């Protein structure tokens, strides 16, 4: 059963990123969005709008699931809960680590400076699958605060819900710091294409033509 759940989540994430990646970058997770904002990949305003949309979408999705599910399942509509004998500290650590891995994979697969090792949507989806296989029996493998929120509201179940916000966001922030200062091989290196594009957008057309002519000479 856990394999089916893990594949369902991973393939769904892959499909969603493939569907909307060209529109918004595939932002469907507040932990990822906040990490991207901290790493200065997106603006604070854009991050706020993304997180708002993610929360609203999760709530609507939770109630759609509730409307399509027999009533005797309504007390547990995919609610993320701690497993038997799993302490809050252990659950916090598991969600932090799982989200750290997920966000780091997202940074790596979407980094324009790095060579591509395959489809980003597929790699991210497979990472979500691995995360579920590793942790679903312990925490439900949320890795996404809005995903846990939608289920919690629809089922009116709030046990240890704070873990599913604080731990994933902490894992995302840790990933942003590690990737930016340790794993990014091009940190501080000027990208000439980006520099020329910025120069062209900032400088008057005639001035840019003069720069081009001097470069050719």
Image (cartoon, grey):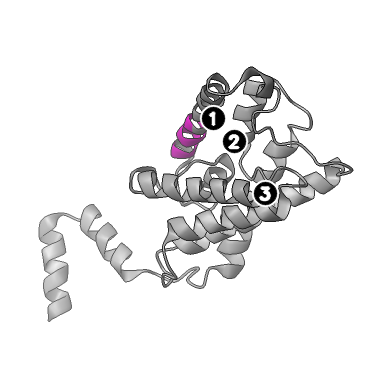
Residue at the spot 54% in from the left edge and 50% down from the top edge: 10
Question: What's the distance in space between the residues labelled 1 and 3, CA to CA?
Answer: 22 Å
Q: Quadrant of the C terminus?
A: bottom left
Q: In this orientation, which residue lies closer to the viewer: 107 or 158? A: 158
Q: Nearer the viewer, residue 153 or 89?
A: 153
Percent from the top left, x then y, of residue 178?
63, 62
Kindly state the secondary structure of the residue where label 1 is placed. helix
Q: Is residue 115 visible?
A: yes
Q: Residues within 10 Å of mark 1 (few under 14, many from 20)?
A: many
Residue bearing mark 1: 58
Mark 2 or mark 1, which has the lower sequence index?
1
Magenta span includes 51: yes
Please report the residue visible at 75 percent of the width from the left and 38 percent of the height from the top.
163
Judge by depth and name the residue closer to the eye, 56 or 212: 56
Give the magenta range.
Answer: 46-53
Q: Are marks 2 and 1 in contact (CB under 8 Å)?
A: yes
Q: For numbered disc 3, what is the local secondary structure? A: helix
What residue does disc 2 label?
147
Residue placed furthest toward the right = 85
CA distance separating discs 2 and 1: 6 Å
Instruction: Tell me, for residue 2, which label it has, or none.
Output: 3
Say which label, 1 or 3, has the lower sequence index: 3
Q: Are marks 3 and 2 in contact (CB under 8 Å)?
A: no
């Amino acid at each position: 059963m856990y394999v089916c759940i893990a594949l369902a989540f991973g393939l769904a994430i892959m499909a969603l990123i493939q569907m909307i990646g060209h529109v918004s970058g595939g932002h469907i997770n507040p932990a990822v969005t906040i990490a991207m904002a901290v790493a200065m990949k997106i603006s604070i305003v854009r991050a706020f709008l993304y997180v708002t949309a993610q929360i609203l979408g999760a709530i609507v999705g939770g109630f759609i699931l509730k409307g399509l599910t027999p009533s005797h399942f309504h007390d547990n509509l995919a609610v993320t809960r701690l497993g038997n004998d799993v302490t809050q500290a252990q659950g916090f650590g598991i969600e932090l680590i799982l989200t750290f891995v997920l966000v780091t994979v997202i940074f790596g697969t979407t980094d324009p400076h790095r060579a591509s090792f395959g489809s980003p949507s597929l790699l991210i989806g497979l990472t979500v699958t691995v995360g579920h296989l590793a942790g679903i029996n312990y925490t439900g493998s949320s890795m996404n605060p809005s995903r846990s929120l939608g289920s919690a509201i629809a089922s009116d179940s709030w046990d240890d819900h704070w873990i599913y916000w604080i731990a994933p966001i902490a894992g995302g922030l840790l990933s942003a710091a590690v990737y930016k200062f340790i794993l990014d091989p091009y940190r501080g290196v000027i990208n000439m294409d980006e520099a020329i594009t910025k120069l062209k957008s900032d400088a008057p057309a005639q001035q840019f033509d003069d720069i081009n002519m001097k470069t050719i000479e």
